[in-house]
Amino acid sequence: MKHLIDIMELSTQELEELIACAEDIIANPAKYAQACRGKKLATLFFEPSTRTRLSFEAAMYELGGQVLGFSEASSSSAAKGESVSDTVHTVSCYADIIAMRHPKEGAPLVASRRNWVPIINAGDGGHYHPTQTLADLLTIHREKGRFTGLTIGLCGDLKFGRTVHSLVSAMSRYEDIRFVFISPEELQVPEYIKTDVLEPRGIPYKEVASLENAMPELDILYMTRVQRERFFNEEDYVRLKDTYILTPDKLRNAKEDLSILHPLPRVNEISVLVDDDPRACYFKQVLNGKYMRMALILKLLEVKV
C-alpha cells in the first residue's frame, strides 16, 4: 500500500507524472468528473486548516467521490483520549483514502503503519507538508517551465515552516539549484536541512537577514508567515512576527519574471498592494493545490482515466 508522508517518497519521475496528470485535469476536467465515483475520502484534521482541508474535499468532489471527516480534534474521539492510531484505524473501515493533519511531528507516519488504506500527510507539526509542496511544484512548473537553473529565496519562519522543509527537499534533486535563506537568527532553517539535504548534494546556499539585498538575484521568492502556534511564548512571537513584510517598494529591484509564492494563510507579511502585481502567484498556488491533490488521489487509489 502506498502512502504519502514525505515528499521524498515520490521520485522525480513520479512528480513529473503527477504534474502531467494535473495539467490534463486542468485541460480536460469533464474527463475526470466521475473518476472516483463510489470512493470516499476521509479528512482527519486535528488542527485548524482552511485551504488544505477544503482543497482535499473539493478535489474529491470534482473527481465524483464523497467526503467524510472532522475539522478539529475536539469534535473527534481524540477528545476522549483515543490514540491517533486507533482513530485512523477506525476511519479506514469507512473510507478508501485518508488525508490527515496533526500538530505532532510523525503522527501520520505512525498512523500509516497500522492502516490498510492510503494515508496522505496533510501537515504534521513543523515537520512536512508534502501536498503543499505538490502545489508549489506545479506553480513553479507553470510559471517557469522548468525545475532547473533557479535561485530560490525562502523568507520568514524557516525553522518551523514545514512547507519550507518539504520544498527545499523536493527542489534539491534538480540541477543548478541555489537557495537563499532569509530569516532572523532565531528562525533560521534547521541544521538537518543543511547537513542532510543540501550539503551531501553540494547544493549552494546562503543565510542572510536582508530581504532587500537578496531580492535582485531571486527567480522565486517563497514568503512565509511567522507562526504563532509554533511558539512557546507570546513575547517571542510578537518580537519576530513583523520582521519581513513584502511591499511594492521592496520589489523595485526584483526581476521582471520573479514568481512570488506563499503557502498561505498570510497575516501581514505580504501587503495586499502586492496582490495586483503580475508576479504574485500565491492565489494561483491555491488552485494548483486542488489539481495536484486530485492527481495524487487518483495515483494512490490506482484509478486509471
Image: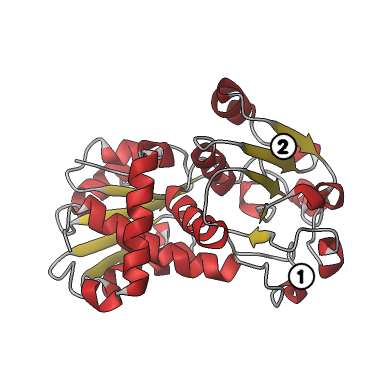
Q: Are marks 1 and 2 in contact (CB under 8 Å)?
A: no
The residue drawn where x is 60% and y is 46% is: 161
Residue 261: x and y in percent read: 62, 59
Give the CA distance from mark 1 to mark 2.
Answer: 23 Å
Which of the two residues, 94 or 189, is positioned nearer the viewer here? 189
Q: Which residue is mark 1?
A: 271
Residue 6: x and y in percent read: 41, 40
Q: Secondary structure beneath disc 1?
A: loop
Residue 275: x and y in percent read: 69, 74
Split into 4 quadrants, where in the image is the N terminus?
top left
The residue drawn where x is 81% and y is 47% is: 214
Q: Secondary structure beneath disc 2?
A: loop
Q: Where is residue 72, by image quadrant?
A: bottom left
Q: Which residue is mark 2?
A: 188
What amino acid is labelled 1 in the image?
Ser
State left or right for residue 129 relative to residue 283.
left
Label 1 environment density (alpha carbons within 10 Å; few <14, some 14–19, many ≥20): few
Q: Is residue 132 above or below residue 286?
A: above
Label 2 environment density (alpha carbons within 10 Å; few <14, some 14–19, many ≥20): some
Which of the two residues, 147 or 92, is positioned nearer the viewer here? 147
Q: Is residue 43 visible in this depiction of the protein?
A: no
What amino acid is labelled 2 in the image?
Gln
Which of the two residues, 216 or 82, is positioned nearer the viewer here? 216
Residue 295 is marked as none
> Which of the marked residues, 1 or 2, is nearer the chain's N terminus?
2
Split into 4 quadrants, where in the image is the C terminus?
bottom left
